[in-house]
């Protein structure tokens, strides 16, 4: 692992350059006083100032993060319960059917999901806005969480549970002291994946926003009609930094929890 | 388990903080009490300061939402679930919305500033008597070009110039059946609302002759191409041309004399409106001479507001490219709703042309 062959290293470098150059290009020009992305004139904070002066834009940014956090949290809880439920099924056929249904939701096009939600919400009379966006984000995040938690549950040795029972653990103890600590990395992975899904979703959100509630992706899409202004670059820069912080946070948690779980194993 | 619960609580605390911040931010600036209206407009199509000014003057809070196409807006309004008080469709969409019974008739007594609008833009065929709509901005379809990249004798005073052999592989067309077919019809001296199969076929043949000059049929990407001098000539809307010329001063815009399309974006009040008085107040506010002048200055499209034009820079309103003189105006035509059959025919012939490229 330490010594990658030269070709592999070059390949990796190219991949990362292709992935990151557009982002840094975008952020670089958010400091351009020139007003366009054609050539760099001089350094300025004015586009960032423009973002912070526009309260509407700030509210939309906050809404986007709020929806992402809240929907991922709820989706993680639901998804983990779902995964536990699927694993506990004795009937193999039913289990596989449920799993396939879960996967269908992951691969089905966002446009279809979005349009279906719009129709559903208008039929049952849910006002478009915060609630409708939250519900649909939870809905498309749950299958992802299930998929992240399941492998952890599958690889778990069932004798761990038997041993816990033998040592006098109740069902509740088994869940909170054995299973959940064991699958914790899967749960966190599911949460963070749901977070990124929710942050950048456009297709579903587009259909279910309304009544003044909007998220960044939808807003930027409408703004782009008259050409991308550097304000969009500035917002993108801010969002990139937020995502970076989230990833760093994820790594800190992961490192701490891997220490925790080694403790658990000692205790068991 | 403990760390899971801790993390969950941390997320909830952050959410609560974010929610609180959003709420306080949203409530600042609203005088409170006098109600709320929701305005549904195109992206970047209003000066944000004017929304603040409206709230300060009337106490009505404005929830402002944006859309990017007439069709997207239609779907949201048709489906309900959101209370839009004011929307800004283009003229053909006003006609469709009228047909679907989605609009509320305007109370002209509550719109005294309607008198500011140039009568030329009122009482158009898509909405006789302006029963349902008030023009917001207007424009034409024309040719934007870079004089440095083409021979001097081409000034596009006539559509004929597009067919010039010197323009081989240099022309971009906007991807719209009505716009391109309309251009061909105009160039042959016919109305762009023609409902005659033989004439349409003639226009299609004319377009196919243009094929060697056409480099692409594209949408909004035309703007950066023209701005960066990567394309020489494009058929597009005057509003888009104004944006391009704002960023690239070399560009020129021309509305050929044979005639062209005249388009409008209009204020309407959808049936879903919950604050009809507020909606009228907003429309009336936007029709005010000073407000409209400030807005026109910000948006950069052509205003139908005669009183506002007196307040605008002389240089802007005498610019014949965006405020065409009488002789050219006479030849401008508004799109009529062709009905399903003829809309289909236009698209079909346009597709035939695209396949010949």
Image (cartoon, coloured by chain):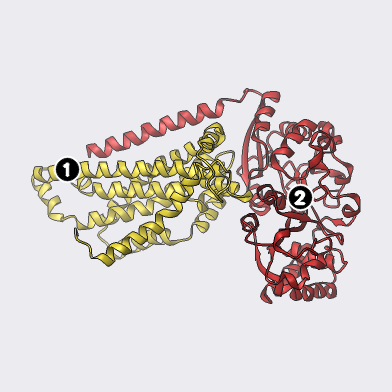
Chain colours: A yellow, B red
Label 2: element kind? helix
- Give residue B30's mark: none
On the picture, is B168 further left or further right than A205? Answer: right
Image quadrant in which the N terminus of chain B is located: top left
Picture residue at 64% right of the left edge, 43% below the top: B44
Q: CA distance from mark 2 to mark 1?
A: 64 Å
Q: Quadrant of residue A243?
A: top left
How packed is label 2: few (under 14 Cα within 10 Å), some, or many (20 or more)? many
Q: Secondary structure at mark 1?
A: helix
- When the figure is inspected, residue B165 is found, relative to residue B235, above or below; the finding is below
Q: Position of residue A246 (x, y in %)?
A: 35, 42
Q: In front: B306, or A155?
A: B306
Mark 2 or 1, which is nearer the eye?
1
Specify whether residue A174 is in view: no
Q: Which residue is rendered at x = 85% and y = 69% of the image?
A: B188
Is residue A158 among the parts visible in the rendering? yes
- Residue where numbered disc 2 is placed: B94
Name the mark on residue A259: 1
In the shown orientation, is residue B82 left or right of residue B96?
A: left
- The residue at the point 23 percent across, 49 percent down is A183
| Residue at horizontal 40 percent and vertical 56 percent from the top | A19
Between B232 and B17, which is closer to the camera in this rendering?
A: B232
**Residue B166 picture location, percent across and down:** 74, 71
Residue A148 vs residue B304, the one in the foreground: B304
Q: Are marks 2 and 1 on the same chain?
A: no
Q: Chain of mark 2?
A: B
């Amino acid at each position: 692992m330490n010594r990658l062959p030269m070709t592999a290293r070059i390949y990796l470098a190219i991949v990362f350059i292709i992935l990151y150059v557009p982002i840094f290009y975008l952020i670089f020009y958010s400091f351009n006083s020139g007003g366009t992305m054609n050539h760099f004139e001089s350094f300025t904070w004015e586009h960032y100032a423009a973002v912070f002066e526009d309260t509407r834009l700030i509210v939309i940014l906050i809404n986007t993060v709020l929806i992402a956090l809240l929907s991922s949290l709820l989706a993680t809880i639901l998804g983990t319960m779902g995964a536990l439920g699927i694993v506990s099924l004795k009937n193999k056929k039913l289990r596989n059917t449920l799993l396939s249904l879960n996967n269908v939701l992951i691969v089905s096009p966002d446009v279809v999901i979005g349009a279906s939600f719009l129709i559903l919400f208008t039929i049952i009379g849910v006002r478009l806005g915060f609630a409708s966006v939250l519900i649909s984000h939870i809905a498309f995040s749950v299958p992802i969480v299930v998929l992240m938690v399941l492998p952890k549950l599958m690889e778990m040795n069932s004798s761990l549970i038997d041993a816990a029972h033998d040592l006098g653990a109740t069902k509740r103890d088994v869940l909170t002291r054995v299973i959940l600590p064991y699958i914790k990395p899967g749960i966190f992975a599911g949460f963070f994946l749901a977070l990124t899904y929710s942050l950048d979703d456009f297709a579903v959100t587009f259909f279910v926003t309304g009544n003044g509630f909007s998220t960044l992706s939808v807003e930027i899409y409408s703004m782009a009609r008259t050409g991308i202004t550097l304000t969009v670059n500035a917002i993108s820069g801010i969002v990139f930094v937020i995502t970076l912080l989230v990833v760093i946070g994820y790594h800190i948690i992961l490192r701490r929890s891997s220490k925790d779980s080694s403790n658990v194993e000692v205790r068991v | 388990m403990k760390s899971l619960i801790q993390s969950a609580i941390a997320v909830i605390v952050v959410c609560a903080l974010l929610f609180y911040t959003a709420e306080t931010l949203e409530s600042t600036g609203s005088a409170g009490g006098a109600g709320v209206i929701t305005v549904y407009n195109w992206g970047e199509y209003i000066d944000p300061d004017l929304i603040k000014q409206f709230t300060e003057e009337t106490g009505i809070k404005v929830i402002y939402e944006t859309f990017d196409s007439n069709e997207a807006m239609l779907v949201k309004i048709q489906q309900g679930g959101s209370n839009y008080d004011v929307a800004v469709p283009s003229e053909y969409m006003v006609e469709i919305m009228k047909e679907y019974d989605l609009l509320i008739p305007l109370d002209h007594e509550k719109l005294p500033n309607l008198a500011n609008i140039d009568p030329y833009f009122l009482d158009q065929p898509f909405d006789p008597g302006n029963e349902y709509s008030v023009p917001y901005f207007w424009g034409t379809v024309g040719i934007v070009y870079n004089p440095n990249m083409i021979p001097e004798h081409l000034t596009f005073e006539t559509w004929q110039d597009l067919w010039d052999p010197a323009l081989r592989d240099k022309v971009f067309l906007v991807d719209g059946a009505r716009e391109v077919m309309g251009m061909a019809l105009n160039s042959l001296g016919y109305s762009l609302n023609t409902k005659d199969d033989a004439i349409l076929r003639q226009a299609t043949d004319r377009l196919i002759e243009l094929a060697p000059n056409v480099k692409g049929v594209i949408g909004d990407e035309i703007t950066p191409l023209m701005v960066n001098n990567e394309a020489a000539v494009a058929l597009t809307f005057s509003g888009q041309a104004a944006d391009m010329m704002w960023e690239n001063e070399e560009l020129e815009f021309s509305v050929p004399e044979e005639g062209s399309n005249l388009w409008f974006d209009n204020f309407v009040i959808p049936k879903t409106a919950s604050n009809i008085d507020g909606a009228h107040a907003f429309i009336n506010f936007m029709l005010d001479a000073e407000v409209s002048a400030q807005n026109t200055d910000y948006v950069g499209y052509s205003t139908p507001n005669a009183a506002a034009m007196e307040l605008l820079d002389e240089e802007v309103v005498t610019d014949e490219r965006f405020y065409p003189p009488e002789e050219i105006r006479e030849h401008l035509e508004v799109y009529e709703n062709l009905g399903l059959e003829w809309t289909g025919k236009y698209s079909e012939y346009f597709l035939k042309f695209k396949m010949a490229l």
